[in-house]
Amino acid sequence: MDDSSPIARELAHETKRRERLLGRELPKPEKTRVFTVSNQKGGVGKTTTTVNIAAALAAAGLNVLVIDIDPQGNASTALGVEHHADVDSIYDVLINDFPLADVVAPCPDISNLICAPATIHLAGAEIELVSLVAREQRLRRAIDVYAKAREKNGEERLDYIFIDCPPSLGLLTVNAFCAAGEVLIPIQCEYYALEGLSQLLKNIEMIQKHLNADLEVSTILLTMYDGRTNLAAQVAAEVRQHFPDQVLGAVVPRSVRISEAPSYQQTVMTYDPSSSGALSYLEAAAEIAER
């Protein structure tokens, strides 16, 4: 196969990318970075982005916690963590004041990665939260208490916390925004992608004004990129033009491997570490760590 063929060029490019990333040590942040992964549009790759970036950072030796506050519990599934109705979950933390330490479980495939799972009980949590005291700050308080408990027990500090949100802007998502310092927005490279973004940014502005002045949209990741279409390139160019500082250089392609991984209760990092999808998430994680 000569170098001029498209497949050979693609393979050579992927090999170079892989060589750049192999064995690369990622810097520890000065303090725990808390990300809310949010977009009220469904199907843009929020959960996929959450679990794969968390897995990539944990594989690089960093301590990572994923908090699943989506009632569907897809992040818990992808990380191989039990989340049936009898399991103590993030619902108990938000509604029944359980300590976060009582509900976190380790990811079986990746050391340094733990998850606070979601169960179906979360579906009713929006209504139950309405009557509770300090309803918007309950997740933030639980994270603060957990950080102090880890320190007291002589455990290593968490480097990253990723909160996977439901595709809505209810009280669960508001809790996530109040608990985080940064927002990571996955944007699908398709026509509707930019339509919901302005509404999301307005909501974030409202949170900044009234509940969490420290919140910032620090990271935007382009997902489901199909290099064969002009539309994907157009959407990517438009997002980069509007948000030059926030958009990551790494772009996540449409990938069968990424879609298959959760059915084996894995992230693409362990399911097929040599795939182009795993490579893209490794690049994205490295960019986030080095920012």
Image (tube, helix red, strand yellow):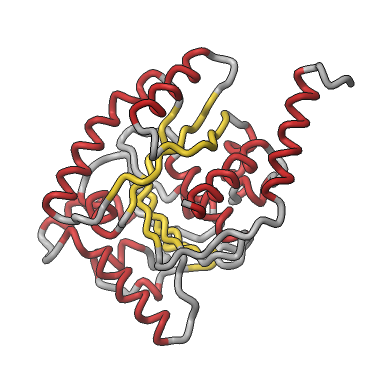
Q: Position of residue 262 (x, y in %)?
A: 57, 45
Say if 159 sits above or below 52 in the image.
below
Which of the 4 image quadrants contains residue 60?
Answer: bottom right
Which of the 4 image quadrants contains residue 193?
Answer: top left
Q: Position of residue 212 (x, y in %)?
A: 19, 56
Position of the N terminus, as image quadrant, is: top right
Task: Say which residue appears at 46% left-offset and 48% top-offset.
Answer: 50
Q: Nearer the viewer, residue 112 or 101?
A: 112
Q: Which of 282 and 141 is in front in this view?
A: 282
Task: Say which residue appears at 45% left-offset and 45% top-offset.
Answer: 47
Say if 145 sits above or below 131 in the image.
below
Say if 166 sits above or below 198 in the image.
below
Outermost residue toward the right in this view: 1
80 left or right, relative to 130: right
Q: How many marks?
A: 0
Q: Which of 184 and 243 is in front in this view?
A: 243
Q: Which of 97 and 274 is in front in this view?
A: 274
Q: Position of residue 173 (x, y in %)?
A: 27, 49
Q: Position of residue 136 (x, y in %)?
A: 18, 58
167 left or right, relative to 170: right
Say if 2 sits above or below 183 in the image.
above
